[in-house]
Image (tube, rainbow, N blue to C red):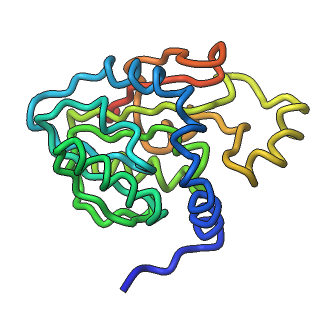
Amino acid sequence: MEKKFSGGLKLNRLRYSLYTPIYDLVVSALQKSRKKAISRLEIAPKSKILIVGAGTGKDLELLPADVEITAIDITPSMLNRLRSKASESGMSVSVEVMDASEMSFPDEHFDLVLLHLILAVVPDPEGCIKEAERVLKPEGQISIMDKFVPEGQQASPLRKVANLFTRILFSDITRQVEPYLQLAKLKKVSDEAVFLSGQFRHLVVKKDS
């Protein structure tokens, strides 16, 4: 029996179910950024990789063929598209409908966790990043790519007004990533602008041991 989701998760599932037919087209402008982000990662053969908020599987084509991939999302229609892509490319992917802030995986299970375009979308980013840290192996990496307010700055009044609409339509544009990293006891390995003059950043982070 499928777990019941909270109000925020139900809204996300509804809107992304509606967006499924056009999602690949909408996010196609970010594919170069995904490619750049993944090219910066240290991915060993046979690595266990978790894609959180995997959507339709836009990360799949950019990953090596010799890794073990698990993909989770709360939107079944998105995951159906991901399964089709995986099947067409001959990739073996474990796919599950799952809440990013309450994963069922054991501790220290994955070598790499991808959080691409998810921390600004989920209703509980704190829970999401803490879960990503929990399931990450001690020497593993988390790859974060999303839109964030620059470190040390506050969202401008105009950005806050725009966020009243964007958070309903697709994403929160007023979040900062640094407080989430501090909460989950993660440290930056790298931080690089990848799109729209730094509005989108790619961070590689590890456990702060």
Q: Answer yes or no: is residue 101 visible.
A: no
Q: How many marks?
A: 0
Please state the horizontal and vertical placement of residue 61, each as a whole percent of the image.
30, 33
Position of residue 98 relative to residue 90, above or below, is below
Quarter of the rendering containing residue 41: top left
What residue lies at 89% left-to-right and 40% top-to-bottom?
161
In the image: residue 172, left or right of residue 25: right
What residue lies at 53% left-to-right and 17% top-to-bottom?
194
What residue lies at 43% left-to-right and 79% top-to-bottom?
3
Quarter of the rendering containing residue 151: top right
- Quadrant of the snapshot with the N terminus: bottom left
Please state the horizontal and vertical placement of residue 31, each as a whole percent of the image.
47, 27
In the image: residue 184, left or right of residue 156: left
Please state the horizontal and vertical placement of residue 74, each as a whole percent of the image.
47, 63
- Quadrant of the snapshot with the C terminus: top left
Q: In this view of the protein, which residue sits in the foreground, 88 or 67?
A: 88
Please state the horizontal and vertical placement of residue 200, each as a whole percent of the image.
59, 25
In the image: residue 164, left or right of residue 64: right
Q: Answer yes or no: is residue 158 visible.
A: yes
